[in-house]
Image (cartoon, rainbow, N blue to C red):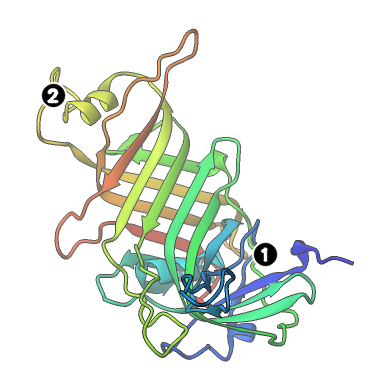
Amino acid sequence: MGFSSQSGQTILRTQAAAGVFQADTGTAGTAIKLRSGSLAPSRTLMMPDPEIGGGRDRSDAYLGGTSFSGDYEFYARLESLPTLLRAGFGTASSAPGTGATAGTNTHTFTPSDASQLPFLSIEEAIGAGLETYRYTDAVVNTLHFEADASGYLQGTAGMVARTQVGGVARTVDPTWDNSPMLVGTNIFLTYGGVTLPAKSFSFDLNNNFADDDYRLGSFYIGDLTPAAREITAGFTIREQDNALWRQAVYGVSTATSPGGLTTKDALVITMNTYESIGDTTVKSGLTINIPKFALNPYAYGASGADIIESDVTGQALRPMANTPIATVTVTNGLATIA
């Protein structure tokens, strides 16, 4: 008999200290439902070069150092997502609601300039009994969100972990995130304060971790330090006028020829569930706010009898030293982040 992937489980928990698996991962962590994905070893069989006097055949082989990486693909739910957002952005703060909003909580995430982002401990069970792993010092290298008008908000977290241990006991009955999902009919975009009639959107965070810091005397990479951060976003739009194109290509929406300066406006993406939190009227929600967003030049996609639509992308820019390049806010019913 084989093993069904659907019987597996993945539990995430923020680590208190580097190099130490968080002992309460199974009980205090959040079990995230995945569409697909698991961490895989980045390891090769080391083969020696042919030697004079050694014959025509390979005589030996060894295993070298390794790290563990992979993509977790999921429908975004707002009770497990904050754990990934804190690990990916680095800084988080939480505030409870009061009065009529008591029972709700607002979690705000901003990018950190620290030399180390939060580590996660991960328990990953493959199938129902095939294997269970524990990963220590896992980081969120990339985080991607996308949705179209007739679909769900989907996410992908690109993970890298320093160490893995197999053959561990699988947690029984972890705390699953069964919170509501987000759909395109409840997602809204504004750029420069103007609502965009977008057909889809995407958002990407890349921390550019290097996973090749192998050191003598160890099987594992010695360091996971984030490099230059990149935040990009995009949307598909059916052109209503030429303002966006002129702003992207000429630099200013009123220009009629290319200039050197670019217009930077705020891009805000707001998402809410249909369901309210507990007994309140407050909806669970996710908001992405990029205060300084510059459009990449693009071409009109005119083709035959098709209605003209454009895939517009852009780059988030740092407004000033003490202002975050982006802020993500989650509203849910949890007081703490796993």
Closer-to-camera residue (283/223): 223
For the N terminus, the quadrant is bottom right
- N-terminal label among 1 and 2: 1
Q: Residue at x 80, y 63 (%)?
A: 4
Q: Position of residue 274 (x, y in %)?
A: 60, 49
Q: Nearer the viewer, mark 1 or mark 2?
A: 2
Where does label 1 land, which residue?
178
Please, which residue is most extreme toward the right here? 1
- Give above or below for 278 relative to 199: below
Q: Residues within 10 Å of mark 2 (few under 14, many from 20)?
A: few
Give, as a three-letter code, the residue at label 2.
Pro
Circle 1 Cα neighbour tier, 10 Å, few/some/many (<14 / 14–19 / ≥20): few
Q: Is residue 13 above or below residue 204?
A: below
In the picture, the disc for residue 309 is none
Residue 167 at x, y percent in the picture: 70, 85
In this view, the residue in front, 241 or 331, is 241
Tell me the amino acid under the disc marked 1.
Asn
Identify the image quadrant of residue 34: bottom right
Q: Is residue 174 left or right of residue 183?
A: right
Q: Residue 258: which disc?
A: 2
Location of residue 243 in the rendering, given as x and y in whole percent from the top left corner: 26, 23
